[in-house]
Image: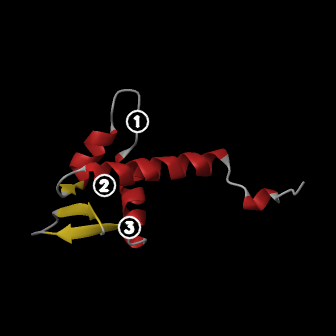
């Protein structure tokens, strides 16, 4: 039996963070067209699920920085998101 050090295991908070990031990615992937961040955030705020706007935007930015999601800028301060193919 092998034991992993505690630093190599995900904490419960990290697991929750990763699960929420996956949900945001799936929400973008399931859409048939590009959507803005506000619409995506409203879709994530189902009854029983609360995610702050700041937390949502931070995780969305992480997906963009990792290259999983493409950010399309149209006009001043209007951005749409879609999954990179």
Give the mark, 2 or 3, whose residue is nearer the N terminus. Answer: 2
Label 2 SS = helix
The Cα–Cα distance between marks 2 and 1, rounded to whole angstroms, is: 21 Å
Q: Residue at x 40, y 35 (%)?
A: 50
Count neighbours of disc 2 (C-alpha within 10 A) and say few if under 14, some if 14 to 19, many if 20 or more: some
Residue 29: numbered disc = 2
Query: Which is more N-terminal, label 3 or label 1?
Result: 1
First in sequence: mark 2 vs mark 1: 2
Q: How packed is label 1: few (under 14 Cα within 10 Å), some, or many (20 or more)?
A: few
Left or right, residue 4 beside residue 63: right
Say which element carries label 1.
Answer: loop
**Residue 46 location, quadrant:** top left
Is 68 placed left or right of 80 in the picture? right
Q: Nearer the viewer, residue 75 or 18?
A: 18
Residue 69 placement (x, y as % from top left): 33, 65
Residue at the far left: name it: 75
Q: Residue at x 41, y 58 (%)?
A: 58
Tell me where residue 67 appears, x and y as whole percent.
38, 72
Residue at mark 1: 50
The x and y percentages for residue 33 are 17, 56
List the residue tagged with mark 3. 68
């Amino acid at each position: 039996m092998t034991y992993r050090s505690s630093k190599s295991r995900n904490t419960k908070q990290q697991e929750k963070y990763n699960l929420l990031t996956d949900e945001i990615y799936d929400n973008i992937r399931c859409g048939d067209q590009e959507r803005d961040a506000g619409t995506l955030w409203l879709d994530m705020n189902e009854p029983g699920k609360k995610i702050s706007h700041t937390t949502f935007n931070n995780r969305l930015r992480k997906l963009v920085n990792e290259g999983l999601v493409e950010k399309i800028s149209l006009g001043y301060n209007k951005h749409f998101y879609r999954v990179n193919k």
